[in-house]
Image (tube, coloured by chain):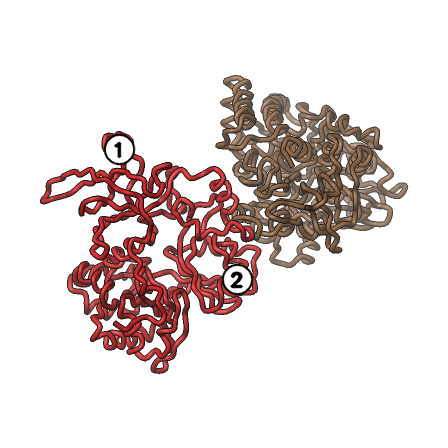
């Protein structure tokens, strides 16, 4: 089994953070030099302003460099059985050419990470993850005839999201791109280059992810920018994407939950049931990591759960503690992600609430701290447990999508 | 609905499997024992290594099998007879020798004899404490179960009852290496080596390895259960296994030999029986594995039924044997230099100093066999002529050390270690190799194959602090349990570990009888 750490880069002690294949373009477009590290690469947090970039996601088309996302190739006669034992969903149901959103757990049913599985062939898969975890993946391979290798550096990835993204793909020259259904992927040839396009994303909007060889990255970026010129295409950083994903109700590792590998204190780890991801857990399939623990938790009932909140007012409830009543001394939960949603015109948040407060429709109170010109102020705002996602336009599912 | 033909199936008719089976059968369970080979006993199984010459594959002396178990299991009623009991230990070098029986030594200075008696009495007190711990099911840590908390409390209480001085002294030495303890307490290198040999036999350690005082105490803890010291059954250790099998069958156990289990059968996340290599399915709601933990979980059960974190612990379990076994068929008795012929009937140690043992151990670290191996030797035919044709003899030796994976390859390593061992024996018993009619040297890899124990480890896994007591073999499988409903362990890989004690088998049976099927 190969570790895949064969990066074509200068010695790491000279340049601890690597450049992605799109870095040259990102550097040129960045107006405020706002770069952040992501899985060993330097990536853009904000190109211009977060508002401008956010509205491009909801109204036009956006390019987001997701090359640093960790990718593993999983091949071999036992690849399906191996992945089925690894993740909580039933991988046997994943057809060739389809993508599945998955989470995986340790022995005690606590989430290690989330990601996606692409099925290329019967015995050929790609697993995309937020964190590097070859150690866990290789130990999981004991007893299975399967090869797992990291291919992060071998595949450049670009996310094209927004209502005009399908138009951009067609204009770019990918004939039939409009036929790709959600969670489906296809391979295209363009000017002698192979591009894999999957209808996936982290915005909850119409959008695609493009996978290519690193040496083709710049040419494809340029061609996409040219194709999207009349449709408002622009590069976006991680901050704008984070706003879009909160509206879509998606969870962000290390913000909404912590990998069980990184927790030290008791009760800081989360099971998929506690994160409201029970639809991802197939307790009826053959044994998988954490199954026995999840069955026990299901029988015993949840002590806390992640839910969506609709909060009164327009002050984002960042990091707020939650109380059952405004006069309570003891909190009943806390906010993990919060924002004023410009598209929904609602003050929304993701929060972990103790039992029984996580029931749908339950009212709690958010203790919001506001920092205004160096003065701290406090607001106690009523909040209601609501359904996620907060924003789910029909266009995200429509096939073929409108051109706009 | 699966109909169960048996209440319990035990995989492996090693001594622990047979002990476990008999206890279960006596409690009213219908029990089937499956043995892959044609003889019972595992490491203690009798073996004719040359026409007319017999020895057990592994074990050569019985010294940890409790007198109480012999009575409870009715072994003497089922044919167990003793050829010799309370054998002395003689440490022999070409120049001199010392003879040890319990706390008494002859052949050394008065000072050392006194020091030995003193140390021996102290170690025996600690061994008695440890024996109390080793003869009960270890508690689960972090458990809120009354039984677990009670046994943890009892353990602490027993330690406290050693008295302030002994408790402190016990806690001081228990994590030490035997080299330091022996050189602190004793001056005679032969006595130091005798202590060192007891600490390392069968393990993956040299005398300087941390934790070797623990292995020493653990061995002595087993020895406190018998008033009869080093013993030799008529017919060799294999006769103990045969008596165990006969007694088990008399208690209602069904025994099938030549029945190789291919896998443990699982349906809907619980054990339903076993599949034999022939394809035959044998059904039982509970399966007890006397097979080593690695093979049980990784081969017989399969990782698909287990969580990755647990598999990781199985994979990290240290169970590489570095101990070999020598069997010699002798045309006549050799003479031990300077000693009367009857002394050949002692438990003989050929290890003149701790440094000698440590140097022998070094070889195993680098994929080699010891050039000057440290030996525990017996000549069982002195006490039991039935093991060889009339007038001829058998010599057996536990040979330390041989790396599991030897750089030179198995047959070259085997030849080299045989030559080195014969040369070592010749030095203390001149002319011995000239009397050898036939020889057999079993390397750890041979023992792995012969006894079907991964790594050929004598104790199914190193006895060390991280593989001891409530974490033996590893969390999630300690307390004879497994993550899978209906699957249990009863072998030397479980608490309290290896040696011919029968304790893992007995404690596993108690644990199984306490749990619901």
Q: Is residue B259 left or right of residue B188?
A: right
Q: Residue furthest left?
A: A373
**The numbered mark 1 sits on a residue in which chain?**
A
| Above or below, B423 relative to A45 | above
Please state the horizontal and vertical placement of residue B9, each as a whole percent of the image: 72, 42
Disc 1: CA contacts within 10 A as few (<14), some (14-19) or many (>=20): some
Please state the horizontal and vertical placement of residue A222, each as a whole percent of the image: 25, 75
Q: Is residue B128 left or right of residue B78?
A: left
Please state the horizontal and vertical placement of residue B130, each as a whole percent of the image: 59, 27
Q: Is residue B308 left or right of residue B285?
A: left
Helix, strand or loop at mark 2: helix
Contact (Cβ within 8 Å) of mark 1 with mark 2? no
**Display colour for chain A:** red
Q: Quadrant of the C terminus of chain A?
A: bottom left
**Display colour for chain B:** brown
Disc 2: CA contacts within 10 A as few (<14), some (14-19) or many (>=20): many
- The disc at residue A79 is 2
Distance in Å between CA atoms under marks 1 and 2 = 51 Å
Nearer to the camera, B450 or A39: A39
Please state the horizontal and vertical placement of residue B368, each as a whole percent of the image: 61, 53
> Are the residues under marks 1 and 2 on the same chain?
yes
Asked whether residue B72 appears in the rendered view, the answer is yes
**The numbered mark 2 sits on a residue in which chain?**
A
Q: Which residue is mark 1?
A: A325
Q: How many numbered circles does the render carry?
A: 2
Q: Quadrant of residue B89?
A: top right
| Above or below, B193 relative to A116 | above
| Above or below, A100 relative to A322 | below
Query: Which mark sits nearer the N-terminus, 1 or 2?
Result: 2
């Amino acid at each position: 089994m190969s570790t895949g750490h064969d990066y074509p880069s200068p010695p790491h002690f000279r340049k601890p953070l690597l450049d992605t294949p799109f870095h040259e373009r990102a550097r040129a477009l960045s107006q405020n030099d706002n770069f952040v590290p992501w899985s060993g690469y330097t990536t853009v947090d904000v190109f211009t302003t977060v508002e401008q970039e956010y509205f491009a996601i909801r109204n036009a088309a956006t390019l987001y460099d997701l090359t640093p996302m960790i990718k593993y190739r999983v091949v071999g006669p036992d690849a399906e059985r191996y992945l089925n034992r690894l993740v909580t969903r039933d991988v046997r149901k994943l057809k060739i050419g389809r993508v599945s959103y998955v989470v995986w757990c340790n022995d005690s049913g606590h989430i290690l990470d989330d990601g996606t599985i692409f099925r290329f062939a019967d015995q050929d898969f790609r697993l995309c993850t937020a964190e590097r975890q070859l150690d866990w993946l290789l130990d999981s391979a004991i007893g299975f005839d399967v090869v797992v290798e990291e291919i992060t550096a071998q595949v450049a990835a670009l996310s094209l999201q927004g209502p005009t993204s399908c138009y951009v793909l067609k204009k770019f020259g990918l004939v039939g791109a409009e036929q790709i259904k959600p969670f489906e992927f296809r391979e295209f040839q363009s000017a002698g280059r192979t591009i894999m396009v999957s209808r996936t994303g982290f915005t909850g909007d119409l959008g695609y992810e493009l996978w290519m060889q690193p040496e083709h990255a710049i040419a494809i970026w340029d061609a996409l920018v040219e194709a999207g010129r009349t449709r408002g295409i622009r590069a976006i950083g991680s901050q704008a994407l984070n706003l879009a994903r909160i509206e879509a109700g998606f969870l962000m590792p290390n913000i909404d939950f912590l990998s069980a590998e990184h927790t030290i204190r008791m009760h800081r780890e989360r099971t998929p049931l506690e994160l409201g991801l029970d639809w991802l857990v197939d307790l009826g399939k053959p044994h998988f990591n954490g199954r026995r623990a999840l069955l026990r938790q299901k029988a015993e009932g949840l002590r806390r759960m992640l839910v969506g909140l609709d909060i009164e007012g327009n002050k984002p409830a960042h990091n707020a503690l939650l109380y059952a009543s405004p006069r309570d001394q003891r909190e009943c939960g806390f906010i993990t992600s919060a924002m004023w949603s410009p598209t929904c015109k609602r003050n929304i948040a993701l929060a972990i609430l103790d039992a029984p407060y996580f029931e749908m429709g339950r009212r709690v109170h958010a203790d919001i701290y506001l920092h205004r010109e160096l003065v701290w102020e406090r607001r106690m705002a009523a909040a209601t447990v609501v359904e996620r996602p907060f924003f789910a336009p029909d266009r995200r599912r429509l096939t073929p999508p409108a051109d706009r | 609905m699966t109909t169960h033909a048996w209440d319990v199936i035990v995989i492996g008719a090693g001594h622990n499997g047979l002990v476990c089976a008999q206890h279960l059968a006596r409690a009213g369970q219908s029990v089937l024992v499956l043995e892959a080979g044609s003889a019972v006993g595992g490491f203690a199984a009798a073996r004719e290594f040359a026409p007319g010459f017999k020895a057990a594959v592994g074990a050569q002396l019985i010294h940890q099998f409790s007198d109480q178990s012999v009575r409870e299991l009715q072994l003497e009623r089922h044919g167990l007879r003793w050829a010799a009991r309370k054998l002395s230990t003689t440490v022999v070098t070409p120049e001199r020798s010392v003879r040890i029986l319990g706390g008494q030594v002859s052949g050394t200075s008065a000072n050392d004899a006194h020091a030995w008696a003193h140390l021996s009495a102290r170690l025996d007190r600690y061994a008695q404490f440890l024996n109390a711990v080793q003869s009960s099911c270890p508690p689960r840590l972090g458990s809120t179960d009354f039984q677990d908390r009670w046994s943890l409390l009892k353990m602490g209480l027993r330690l406290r009852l050693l008295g302030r001085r002994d408790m402190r002294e016990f806690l001081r030495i228990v994590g030490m290496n035997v080299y330091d303890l022996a050189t602190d307490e004793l001056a005679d290198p032969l006595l130091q080596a005798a202590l060192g040999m007891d600490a390392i036999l069968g393990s993956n350690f040299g005398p300087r390895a941390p934790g070797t005082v623990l292995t020493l105490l653990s061995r002595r803890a087993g020895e406190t259960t018998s008033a009869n010291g080093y013993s030799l059954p008529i017919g060799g250790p294999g006769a103990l296994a045969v008596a165990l099998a006969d007694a088990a069958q008399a208690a209602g156990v069904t025994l099938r030999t030549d029945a190789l289990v291919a896998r443990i059968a699982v349906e809907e996340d619980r054990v339903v029986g076993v599949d034999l290599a022939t394809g035959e399915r044998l059904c039982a709601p509970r399966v007890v594995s006397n097979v080593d933990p690695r093979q049980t979980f990784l081969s017989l059960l399969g990782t698909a039924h287990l969580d990755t974190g647990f598999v990781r612990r199985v994979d990290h379990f240290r169970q590489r044997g570095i101990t070999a076994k020598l069997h010699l068929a002798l045309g006549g008795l050799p003479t031990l230099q300077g000693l009367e012929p009857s002394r050949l009937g002692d438990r003989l140690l050929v290890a003149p100093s701790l440094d000698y043992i440590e140097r022998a151990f070094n070889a195993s670290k680098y994929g080699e066999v010891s050039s000057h191996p440290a030996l525990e030797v017996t000549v069982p035919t002195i006490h039991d002529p039935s093991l060889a044709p009339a007038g001829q003899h058998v010599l057996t030796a536990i040979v330390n050390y041989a790396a599991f994976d030897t750089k030179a390859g198995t047959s070259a390593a085997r030849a080299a270690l045989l030559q080195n061992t014969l040369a070592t024996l010749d030095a203390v018993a001149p002319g011995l190799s000239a009397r050898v009619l036939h020889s057999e040297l079993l390397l750890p890899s041979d023992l792995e194959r012969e006894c079907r124990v991964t790594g050929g480890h004598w104790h199914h896994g190193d006895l060390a602090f991280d593989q001891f007591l409530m974490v033996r073999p590893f969390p999630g499988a300690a307390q004879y349990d497994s993550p899978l409903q209906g699957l249990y362990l009863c072998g030397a890989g479980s608490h309290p570990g290896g040696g011919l004690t029968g304790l893992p088998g007995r404690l596993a049976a108690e644990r199984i009888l306490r749990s619901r099927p």
